[in-house]
Image (cartoon, coloured by chain):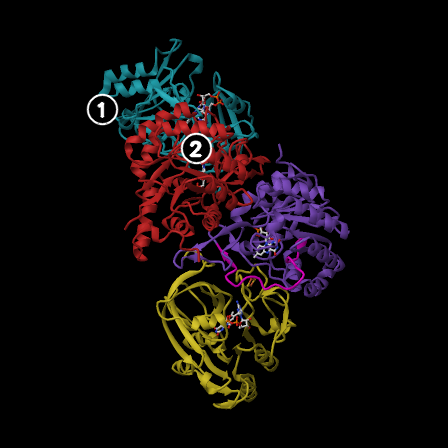
Chain colours: A red, B purple, C yellow, D cyan
Amino acid sequence: MDISTTISSIKLKNPTILASGIMDEDAGSMQRIIKRGGVGAVVTKSIGLTARRGYPNPTVIELEHGILNAMGLPNPGIDHYGEEIEKIKHLQTPIIGSIYGANPDEFIELSRRMEDLDVDALELNLSCPHTKKYGLEIGCDPYLVRKITCAVKENVSIPVFIKLSPNVTSIIELAKMAEEAGADAIVAINTVKAMKINIDLRRPILSNKIGGYSGKAIMPIGVRCVYEIAENIQIPIIGVGGITTGEDAIEYFMAGASAVQIGSGVYYRGIDIFKTVCSEIENWMKKHGYKKLSDLIGVAHI
Amino acid sequence: MDISTTISSIKLKNPTILASGIMDEDAGSMQRIIKRGGVGAVVTKSIGLTARRGYPNPTVIELEHGILNAMGLPNPGIDHYGEEIEKIKHLQTPIIGSIYGANPDEFIELSRRMEDLDVDALELNLSCPHTKKYGLEIGCDPYLVRKITCAVKENVSIPVFIKLSPNVTSIIELAKMAEEAGADAIVAINTVKAMKINIDLRRPILSNKIGGYSGKAIMPIGVRCVYEIAENIQIPIIGVGGITTGEDAIEYFMAGASAVQIGSGVYYRGIDIFKTVCSEIENWMKKHGYKKLSDLIGVAHI
Amino acid sequence: MKHVNLPYITKITDSRIEARGIKTLLFRYPRAVDPGQFFMIWIPGVDEIPMSVSYISQDIKGITFRRVGDATTALYKLKPDDMIGIRGPYGNGFRIDGKHILFVAGGTGIATLAPAIEKAISKGIASTVVIGAKTYEEIFFEERLKNHNAKIHISTDDGSRGYKGYASDLSKQILNKKRERFNSIITCGPEPMMKKLLETCGDIPLQASLERYMKCCIGLCGQCCIGEGLRVCVEGPVFDGKTLKNIEDFGVYRRDPTGRKIRILG
Amino acid sequence: MKHVNLPYITKITDSRIEARGIKTLLFRYPRAVDPGQFFMIWIPGVDEIPMSVSYISQDIKGITFRRVGDATTALYKLKPDDMIGIRGPYGNGFRIDGKHILFVAGGTGIATLAPAIEKAISKGIASTVVIGAKTYEEIFFEERLKNHNAKIHISTDDGSRGYKGYASDLSKQILNKKRERFNSIITCGPEPMMKKLLETCGDIPLQASLERYMKCCIGLCGQCCIGEGLRVCVEGPVFDGKTLKNIEDFGVYRRDPTGRKIRILG
Ligand SMILES: Cc1cc2nc3c(=O)[nH]c(=O)nc-3n(C[C@H](O)[C@H](O)[C@H](O)COP(=O)(O)OP(=O)(O)OC[C@H]3O[C@@H](n4cnc5c(N)ncnc54)[C@H](O)[C@@H]3O)c2cc1C
Ligand SMILES: Cc1cc2nc3c(=O)[nH]c(=O)nc-3n(C[C@H](O)[C@H](O)[C@H](O)COP(=O)(O)OP(=O)(O)OC[C@H]3O[C@@H](n4cnc5c(N)ncnc54)[C@H](O)[C@@H]3O)c2cc1C
Ligand SMILES: Cc1cc2nc3c(=O)[nH]c(=O)nc-3n(C[C@H](O)[C@H](O)[C@H](O)COP(=O)(O)O)c2cc1C
Ligand SMILES: Cc1cc2nc3c(=O)[nH]c(=O)nc-3n(C[C@H](O)[C@H](O)[C@H](O)COP(=O)(O)O)c2cc1C
Ligand code: FES
Ligand code: FES
């Protein structure tokens, strides 16, 4: 059974990737995910030029059908995060550096710094739905997506992945722009803008009021996005949103994803979810007579 | 306990409304909802100029956390639907006529016809996510929303509600355009674009592939939309999406909705859901010392 | 098999021709199903259509159908190991009680009634069965039911076997002779036939299984509604005579997929 | 109370001052909680912060805290009938077994240990308790524990009561005298104190309850991780000595809300 996969020049021994923002604030947690979880690759927390505290708590709550968060992009800043990356390089698992910025110049600066840290690829977070000025405002403007992608591509030689938001009128258009601009892969999706109000206290629970919805509930939205994107571009897609089982991952592969990221699933099924999902994928493939993962990718486009 | 509410000039004895597309293809089913369900108002199926079969089956499936449908706007056309409306007029429950069209002229024609049928208000479906040419393509262009709203307002004298889609970059902008153009209320939200693939058969289940996600999973998305819209416009909002309990409805009221529509909830809790939700609202209000519904509307904006 | 309303993919385990243009497909479906309930059968790339359960055992269920259009033709072509999607069972099913039940089937209606007849007999209820068909080549399930000791009467429109005429007419004869014997009538077939039966059954309680165009089958879309919002997919497909008497459209109108009323041909 | 990870809104039923700047709040929370577990306490409009359970009864639970900043000051001002949101309980809690446990509390650490001590005693386990505080006015729960027949030793930094010095030093003395008596040490307090204790406890198994900046408490955000990805909110807050010996940062560094390492003041 061959479940290895390739995204641009990055070879992954299996198609499960730790999603950005989950257990990746420090080297130790990524190390645990790599060693015990058995991931194919990790994405770092989204890192900016300077440290950010993020929003006050509550920042994460569990809803009936998913997880709602508004962290506010907390991160120690690229100056401090470097040492965390240093510490996990020896583990031989691809590291994808996630970055966010307010404009093309910030993205350029951060990309160079990340490349200097020797990460294997970059993930441009153009899609955080709840942080003003960062993310969504940028990620929903096709021309800005193109501009940033071009700018970064001109400045680094490692592969550049563009992470898109589902909170837009046409994710297809954004994906096309990114491809045109030279992106090496599309990552879809980030969280869905949502809100939970506590009626006893008559107020939104999250301190930022609006947050991003992830976990089981959003999976059909993520699958739709990946499917739509796959019909319109040639570069690989990394699927993310609501994956908790091997069958979920297979649904994403069939929609057109070459690999998947898992975030909230770590809550639903624990740190071992990556291993578990891989063995579920293998079992399913065995049972259904598939020999390699690539035989599944995009087959639902009929 | 006063749970009556007013949307523009329409007085509702209670704030629960049957959502468009659910049990409203013929007079009999609306009659049952009115008599046994005890709704405050009904919205008709979305009606066009001519009959449409809609898509082949499968058109509706239940997912783990919601309902997915791509009916394809089946309807008998305005010529035939008139008699259904005639038959329920005597029931003294406000009837909101839902219409869809491909351009402003179709909307004008349909609005006039609906007004002639003596409905109490119009709901312009600018938001069906899965029917090409109708709905989303129109509903995501702010200028088209304004144009259609203006055109309809100039041609009828009954209140005009605009139903919006969450599948857009900024629902706020659309709501503002509708308000500017003279809309009497905003209805939010229609279904969320989503897909379910069957991995055994390697294909999307719905014949239209992409469908609209409704039911429990989408409630946090609907609440967010209503909250965002309420911060930006003055006209009333009707909240819809995922409501199955009185507490769900209260969450929408606190987000800014003056009334709510229920669709998929009819599946989760049966035809009686409208009555049940009303008594849950009343019980909650009693327990928490509220006397009238208006004391709840918008209070979560702090 | 977590979600009853999401197609469960299963393989055809067996198929057989029952009569001219009539086929049975058997498949693994390990969920409890009652006689009179139905499935939505997904034929990928073609359609999804309602079909009554015609065979019920622990793990294996079956459907029996006439080839009439695209979907049933595609179904007809399926062979063992081909895959279909099943959701359901939907609807209420028959109430099977009393001492002696008269079953009246028209056309493929016998497919729907067969499991009910077997259940009645297994409960020790005397069962008289009228099987009506256009012509002798379209009669099926006669042997199956004889094996269960049902008393069988046959009618054909062309008189090629048994009584010449409609099943409803033959039933009228039977009822006229020994009306007091029956304390229940259960029927499935063309609506005009069932309507006639309703008119002649007098005060014998009747249950009729209806067909309407189906889409969601979970009681949302309203496509299948009759009378005052009765959902054939939820409150039906089996309705009792009292309810049917209040439904103007019974035997007269149905609605097509657009929702438009269509006259039912007699 | 369906969702453990969504704040459950409850009213303060009672509050009391335990010592200078130390307050207990009691509230209805009908979910099982073990000693050593903690809640996230939502003070609407202010913050949501972690707090160990300090009182456990069937329906009523309590927290006991020191006023140190915005959130604890807001909490401090709350009166009966004011509402807060609670989610949890989170974390693993203490393993309470053996014959004789030495409990060592520094500062508000005794809030976390009190329910554990009560449980130990109710299980018939001899309990020796060291309560360390800056000064005599900040000692609390002494009476509460005496009532339960715990053997109590007091230390204050300024010598205003009991032993003059740190709780860890007093514990060292106690251990030096009758080390063989204890088969378990359980501690909660400033990390440098716990680290010292770890160094002196030798082969007596030790459990220490740690504090780290908390956000999600459901093991996702990674904010609270120490060592090789141990989540204080899930695998902690109680860790055993063996584990702690492998954690370089224990007693030395913690991370602030940005994720940056901050030296822990000794
Ligand atoms: C509850 C129920 C149980 C049924 N059980 C049986 C059975 O046991 N055996 C049997 O042979 N037939 C049964 N039918 C009828 C069967 O569903 C139709 O024959 C079949 O759908 C025809 O599909 P088609 O594409 O081959 O024909 P088409 O050419 O599409 O249509 C032929 C007829 O079938 C009807 N039809 C098509 N699609 C649907 C649909 N989604 N829902 C309802 N009617 C539809 C059409 O309205 C038309 O009257 C049942 C119908 C219902 C509602
Ligand atoms: C598992 C656990 C159990 C705790 N139990 C108790 C207890 O029983 N009694 C008690 O008095 N204190 C307890 N604390 C500490 C308590 O959470 C802090 O004192 C409180 O958060 C301070 O908030 P503030 O806004 O008043 O202070 P601030 O001025 O905001 O900060 C003061 C200190 O509290 C820390 N703090 C602030 N927010 C958090 C947070 N979300 N998570 C962790 N630390 C934070 C800061 O990092 C700083 O070191 C516990 C902490 C943890 C992690
Ligand atoms: C607590 C939390 C923090 C997140 N932080 C980030 C982030 O920093 N950068 C980013 O690109 N995505 C972030 N995400 C989004 C995830 O990477 C992922 O796109 C999303 O959660 C959907 O996947 P899931 O359903 O598997 O969680 C975060 C998600 C969660 C739940
Ligand atoms: C089966 C089905 C059919 C629908 N048809 C329509 C329609 O014709 N017009 C329309 O405006 N909305 C239609 N909707 C959307 C609903 O009116 C509603 O906006 C959506 O389902 C969210 O509400 P819910 O979660 O309560 O179902 C339909 C929804 C479903 C499930
Ligand atoms: S088929 Fe949709 S309500 Fe019956
Ligand atoms: S607080 Fe988020 S992982 Fe522990």
Q: What residue type is labelled 2?
A: Glu
Q: Which of the 4 image quarters holds residue C202?
A: bottom right
Q: Nearer the viewer, residue A162 or A167?
A: A162
Identify the image quadrant of residue D167: top left
**Dot 2 and dot 1 within a common chain:** no
Identify the subunit bearing mark 2.
A
Q: SS class of the residue under badge 2?
A: helix
Mark seen at residue A128: none
Chain letter belonging to callout 1: D
For the C terminus of chain A, the image quarter is bottom left
Q: Is mark 1 on a helix, strand or loop?
A: loop
Q: In this view, does C233 lie above or below B139?
A: below
Q: In this view, does D236 lie above or below B101?
A: above
* Residue located beneath label 1 in the image: D203
**Residue B167 spot, x, y in % from top left:** 56, 46
Tell me the distance, in whole angstroms, between the alpha carbons under discs 2 and 1.
59 Å
Q: Is B47 within the magenta? A: yes
The magenta region covers B39-62
Residue density around tag 1, few if under 14, some if 14–19, many if 20 or more, within 10 Å: few
Residue D112 position in % (x across, y down):
40, 26
Depth-wise, is mark 2 or mark 1 nearer the camera? 2
Q: Is residue A213 magenta?
A: no
Q: Can residue A283 be seen here?
A: yes
Q: Residue at x 22, y 22 (%)?
A: D180
The kind of secondary structure the magenta stretch mainly shows is loop
Ligand 6 found in image quarter: top left
Asked whether, in this view, residue A103 is left or right of residue A245, the answer is: right
Against C161, residue B155 (above or below) is above
- Identify the disc placed on residue A154: 2
Q: Which of D151 and B291 is in front in this view?
A: B291
